[in-house]
Amino acid sequence: MTVLLSLLVIVHLLGMAGFVAAWAVQRQRPAGTPLISLWAWCVLVMSLSGFALIGVGIAAGEENGHIKMIIKGTLMTVLGVTVLVYYFRRRGVTPTLPAALAGIVVAEVAVSVLMD
Ligand code: HEM
């Protein structure tokens, strides 16, 4: 269980790094071009690894703070829906969208690190 939890944390942190890479690549592109696919892949990786961390954690007898998980799940829903709508509808990115998405990722990290 501990090994599985550690592997899931590694996948979770790689997904977070993927969001940073997506932001860095996206900001080089002109406004009006669609989101790159890395955003959508990272939404998938973070959602799956995040909820797996909760499930495996419960099975291992670990308790994650409920309020923390509700906030993380809500932020992820806002981020995920925005990314998937823009990505699958091939909508042109507004100049502020990459920074707004990165801001939600930073908020997720802050909640993860600062809340119990
Ligand atoms: C952009 C999305 C997300 C980011 C950037 C993010 C970031 C992080 C970070 C930095 C950690 C700390 C890792 C450690 O040092 O152990 C963490 C842990 C964790 N995350 Fe996420 N996360 C995201 C989404 C989610 C989602 C959607 C869930 C599920 C609702 C989730 C559930 C967890 C759990 C259960 C842990 C381990 C326990 C804890 O830290 O309390 N995460 N996340």
Image: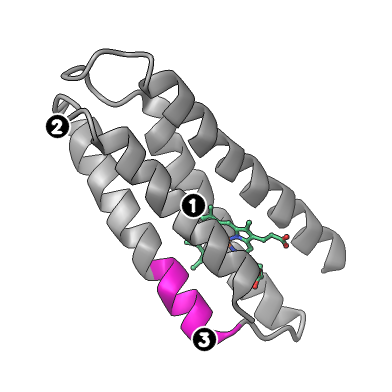
- Counting residues from the start of the chain, the first of labels 3 and 1 encountered is 3
| Element type at mark 2 | loop
Image vertical order of residue 64 relative to residue 52, above or below = below
What is the distance, in whole Å, between disc 3 and disc 2 at their CAs? 34 Å
- Counting residues from the start of the chain, the first of labels 1 and 2 encountered is 2
Residue 36: numbered disc: none
What is the distance, in whole Å, between disc 1 and disc 2 at their CAs? 25 Å
Front-most of residues 37 and 105: 105
Q: Position of residue 4 (x, y in %)?
A: 78, 60
**Magenta segment main secondary structure:** helix
- Counting residues from the start of the chain, the first of labels 3 and 2 encountered is 3
Q: Residues within 10 Å of mark 1 (few under 14, many from 20)?
A: some
Image vertical order of residue 63 relative to residue 84, above or below = below
Relative to 106, is 61 on the left or the right? right
Q: Where are the magenta residues, as a range? A: 65-73
Query: Which residue, given by chain and number where applicable, does mark 1 sit on?
Result: 106
Query: Which residue, given by chain and number where applicable, does mark 2 sit on?
Result: 89
Query: Which residue, given by chain and number where applicable, does mark 3 sit on?
Result: 66
Q: Is mark 1 within 8 Å of ligand 1?
A: yes
